[in-house]
Amino acid sequence: MIEVRKYNYKDYRRLHRPICPYSDKKGNVKEHHYVWWLFYGDKDIIKEGEVIHHINEDYLDNRIDNLKKISKFEHQSLHKKGNTYRKEIFGSYKIERYMEIQNLLKEGKSKKEIMKILDISKQNLNYYLHHFKK
């Protein structure tokens, strides 16, 4: 069962997996940490000062090829406002998706219809509507 809980300023998918070394006292773990652990096990643990970054910036996309372990410092600089590297790498994908959503809204489609057409979750749709900045 997947539980979504508020974590910091984003809603990450969280799983109840007490066996995972990254789980909290209640046995809950962020899904991307669990995926990382399943793939790498003890060979590549997440150390103090490291984070798992979503390469395409879609924090609901927890495929292993979208996850990268980096330092907290590097992570903060990637997400810093005005970072041109960030805009070049991630901007085109986000702009395309955002524009698709905006065009469907202009056509009078409801959020439910858009979710079905684009095969995205309500969380993902809200991410683009509320967190995306051109």
Image (tube, rainbow, N blue to C red):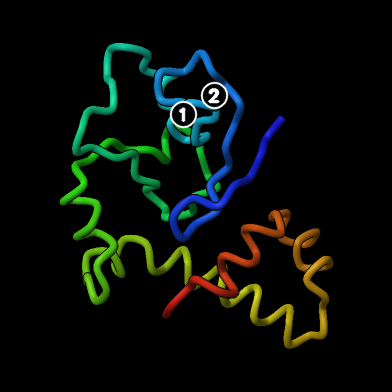
**Which residue: 59% across, 74% down?**
129
* Residue at 49% over, 57% down: 10
* Foreground residue among 62 and 92: 62
Residue 118 left/right relative to 48: right
Q: Position of residue 17 (x, y in %)?
A: 57, 21
Relative height, residue 63 to residue 74 (above, below): above
Asked whether 15 or 32 is in front, the reply is: 15
Label 2 sits on what residue type?
Answer: Gly
Query: Residue 86: which disc?
Result: none
Q: Residue at x 66, y 39 (%)?
A: 3
Q: Answer left or right for 26 relative to 134.
A: right
The local secondary structure at tag 2 comes to loop
To which quarter of the image does residue 118 belong?
bottom right
Real-space Cα separation, disc 1 to disc 2, in angstroms? 5 Å
Q: How many marks?
A: 2
Q: In the image, which disc is placed on residue 27?
A: 2
Rendered residue at 54%/24% (across/down): 27
- Give the amino acid type for the residue marked by disc 1 in the picture: Asp
Where is residue 6 drawn, in percent x and y?
55, 52
Q: Give the quadrant of the N terminus.
A: top right
Q: Residues within 10 Å of mark 2 (few under 14, many from 20)?
A: some
- Residue closer to the observer: 37 or 110: 37
State the image coordinates of residue 79 (x, y, percent, origin top left): 29, 62
Say which residue label 1 marks.
Answer: 24
Q: Given contact means CB atoms under 8 Å apart, are the residues at marks 1 and 2 in contact?
A: yes
Q: Secondary structure at mark 1?
A: loop
- Counting from the top left corner in percent of width and height, residue 37 is at 41, 21
Q: Residue furthest bottom?
A: 106
